[in-house]
Amino acid sequence: MAREPDGVTRRDFLRLGLLAGSAAAAGCAWDGGHLLRPRLATVSRFNDWVGEHIFLSGGRPAPEWPVSARSASMPNYHVADATPLLEDPAAWALNVAGLVRKPMRLTLPMLQALPRVTYTVPHHCVEGWTTIATWTGAPVRAVAQLAEPTGAARYLRFDSFDRTAQGVPYYNGWDLKSAMHPQTILAYAFNDRPLMPEHGAPVRLYSPNKLGYKLTKYLTAMTFTRERPGGFWEDQGYPWLGGV
Amino acid sequence: MESVSEGVPMPPAESAVEPSIEPVIEPAAPARPLVHRHHWIVRLTHWVNAIALTGLIASGLQIYQAFPHFGQKGKVYPVPNPFDMYSFPRWSRLGGWLAGGLQWHFALAWVFLLSGLLYVGYMLVSGEWRTLVFRPRDVPRATQMQLYYLRLRRDHPPQGKHNALQKGAYTFIIALGALSLLTGFAIYKPVQLWWLTALFGGYELARYWHFVAVWLFVGFTILHVTLVLLVDPASLRGMITGWYRGRFPSHGA
């Protein structure tokens, strides 16, 4: 067998390749284990910082699309087994609470009386699909102006009446800057019609600047907090900022 | 006639006695010189990127698993994709599930980006890019090299550190790395970087080019490793220690 001048044979290469291959095979479909998982979560928080401060996911307006670009359908999604429904939709009101000077309960007519924002934008799902639709609602910052958050408020927590079969509620935490973006709205209409139960009726959070899982459906409350709230999926490892 | 009395006497021919002392292995081949071929930055970034890219592809396949199509939901694009609705084997994926795949992908992307920038920065500052970047004048040289490989040309064309075909391959792979990063950012922040996403034909197509890049990387790697093993195994040592003693001494820096 011909030995190469540097003393490495072709058979050695094959051995090396097989070794590397089997090491890769044993290591994959692997989440990092107890040692690496916390470090990956730390990098994920660093990426949130980059998203917030470098990509400016809070400030710039997202480009809007023509109504003619709307997709034929919009997938629906909830963590409950069946579409969450209100027993008495007329009794629904959004609870605005936490670090605010004027806590309040806003009914649907009260939200509809606030300034109205409408846009046609792509919806980006973390899974990798998109779909274009028109959303209409009241800016979160218009509600904040009414409730007057205190200087200590740094985050917003959005709660939902969607919950898993085990009773785990859906919720999301948002940074104040993203929440106060003029395109972040409490949406009550979808494609020019009242919001349907499969899309989060009576009111859902919407923004073209966030991934779909950040856009809380079936809203019950928005709470201004000092501490950073997690989120249903964020607590399981999805990026917390979820900015696009 | 000039006098030849000043002529230097010929020294005794050493070659006349040598063969009787040393056994002849390869009488015609001179000893291969040991040359320093790769700077430590090149070697470091090569292996760091090899590992990072493996992890990026594996975690990328995990992410793909969540929506193994191209196009908007319910409107699949007519782009060729043999892997439509395909589930890649478990051993080829990294992260366990979508969130784990995303965390690995967005962590390793930093390693790939910083290592790539260090490599490109070194190549530019050192001037070594001249030995590697494929330029218009390399087109006829690449043709001659191809003729040689096809046995239509007998002698190996003259070359520097890399021949013209190698220059083409390495220039391509660096451009592919840049394309992967750019399409990656285009689908990571398709709203904030909408202009970049639009450059690749929109979100769905940017995601497609990002996926196509994976198979170009895989194809390149198979060819690259095969050629190292078959044509120039000594070059592996060159990429590990920096020192090369092989068939192509002109490959020295």
Image (cartoon, rainbow, N blue to C red):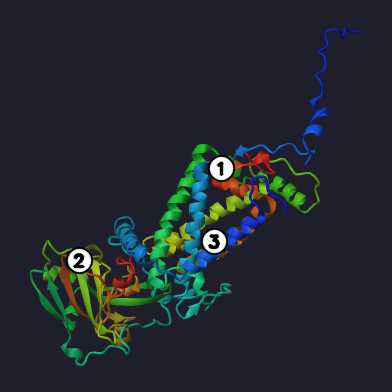
Q: CA distance from mark 1 to mark 3?
A: 22 Å
Q: Residue furthest right?
A: B1
Numbered circle sitting on residue A160 = none
Rendered image quadrant of residue A231: bottom left
Mark 2 packing: few (<14 Cα in 10 Å), some, or many (20+)?
A: many
Q: CA distance from mark 2 to mark 3?
A: 46 Å
Which residue: 9% across, 74% down?
A103
Give the vertical position of A71 relative to A59 (above or below): below
**Marks 2 & 3 on one chain:** yes
Q: Is residue A120 shown above or below B14?
A: below
Query: Judging from the image, what secondary structure is the residue with disc 3 in?
Result: helix
User: In front: B166, or A209?
Assistant: B166
| Three-letter amino acid code at the position of disc 2 | Tyr
Q: Is residue A122 visible?
A: yes
**Taking the image as drawn, is residue B190 in sight?**
no
Which residue is label 1 attached to? B242
Q: N-terminal of the two: label 2 or label 3?
A: 3
Q: Callout 3: few (<14), some (14-19), or many (20+) C-alpha neighbours within 10 Å?
A: few
Q: Are marks 2 and 1 in contact (CB under 8 Å)?
A: no
The chain under label 1 reads: B
Residue wearing tag 2: A155
Image spot of residue A128 (x, y percent) = 43, 72
Q: Are marks 1 and 3 on the same chain?
A: no
Q: Which mark lies nearer to you, 1 or 3? A: 3
Q: Residue furthest left?
A: A101
- Name the secondary structure under disc 2: strand
The N terminus of chain A lies in quadrant: bottom right
Q: Is residue A197 left or right of residue A16?
A: left
**Could you tell me which chain the residue with mark 3 belongs to?**
A
What residue did someone put label 3 on? Answer: A20
